[in-house]
Image (tube, rainbow, N blue to C red):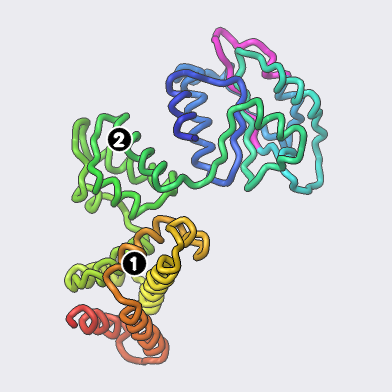
Amino acid sequence: MVLQIWKDIRKNKLAPLYVLYGKERYLIDETKRLIIKHALNGQDNEFNLSSYDLEETPVEQVIDDCITVPFFSDKKVVIADRAYFLTSEKRKETIEHNLHALESYINEPVPSSILVLIAPYEKLDERKKLTKLLLKNTVSIEAKPLTERDAKKWIREQFDEEGFEITDRGLDLIFHYVGANLASLNNEIEKILLYGEKGDLIDEQTVELLVAKSFESNIFSLVDKVVHKRLDEALEIYYQLLKQNEDPIQIAAAIGSQFRVIYQSKVLSKRGYGQKAISGQLKIHPYRVKLALEQGRSFSFNQLMEIMNSLAEMDYQLKTSFGNKERLLELFFFKFLQT
């Protein structure tokens, strides 16, 4: 939904009213940026861009601005942030809002103005008459993390717009390392774009070289090497984590957590649960379930139980031993991956 709205904005198909709500601030900021860029033709036009904080400014002042004609321009943009009155949040109000004025404007907006109402909260109160009216008569975006499919589509679009091409494997790796956090994805994409030139092909090697890997991503990769019994590659990731001053106890705990997810996903899959249902049961991202199910095919239930028991025993040893903890975990890799 949000990707289609962004596409419409880029084609200058602009609506007179937008409502942006949710906790994914990057989605809100990017939508706002696109609206301003295309409505004002990329110009820094201070006379036709206004911003208000609705915790400090009455909404009728915002409406008065909207009905004022643009200054030597076809359009003006009015941003109104922190529209708390669209939620069920209880707070001590210091500003009295004339919400009837807003209702009237929603029913008859001024074509030359674009009003962007922002509610950076988890939910809107859809029982309220005003909220229902807004959602029915405006372009609304719920700012929540994108699905894997939409995030990958967005990544590809960013490279396409800059004249780059990315392979399917390169795309999968970026999502694997960064996840669906658009702010982090944007940072990593900008890094790749600065490194390359238009027309370049972004492949697996480019992503491996340039994209920062979080602790969680490194653990996923480490577990994947363990699953496929690639000792050298597993040790390389492990030594890199140690160089980053990660605690062996934390590394072992994270590996154990991932193997538990593999085991639980395999059990639920056998019971007939699909990927989405497993994600809901385990309260983890669907992409993590997808990886777990793929990795689980390499083991029987007994083998997974044996690995988890070994990791639990090692966790106890790491926490009670006065010896070399780094070496203890290293020996686990040698023992497990060479059998």
Span shown in magenta = 64-81
Question: Which is more N-terminal, label 2 or label 1?
Answer: 2
Q: Between residues 89 and 266, which one lies in front from this camera angle? A: 266
**Quarter of the image with the C terminus in it:** bottom left
Q: Is residue 202 left or right of residue 261?
A: left
Q: Please give the residue where the numbered disc 1 appears in the rendered image.
A: 219
Q: Is residue 111 left or right of residue 168?
A: right
Q: Position of residue 130 (x, y in %)?
A: 75, 32
Q: Is residue 86 left or right of residue 309?
A: right
- Does 130 appear above or below 84? above
Neighbours of disc 1 within 10 Å: few (<14), some (14-19), many (20+): many
Residue 159 marker: 2
Residue at 49% x, 19% y: name it.
Answer: 13
Residue 156: in magenta span: no
Residue 201 marker: none
Residue at 71% x, 40% y: name it.
Answer: 126
Residue at 54% x, 37% y: name it.
Answer: 28
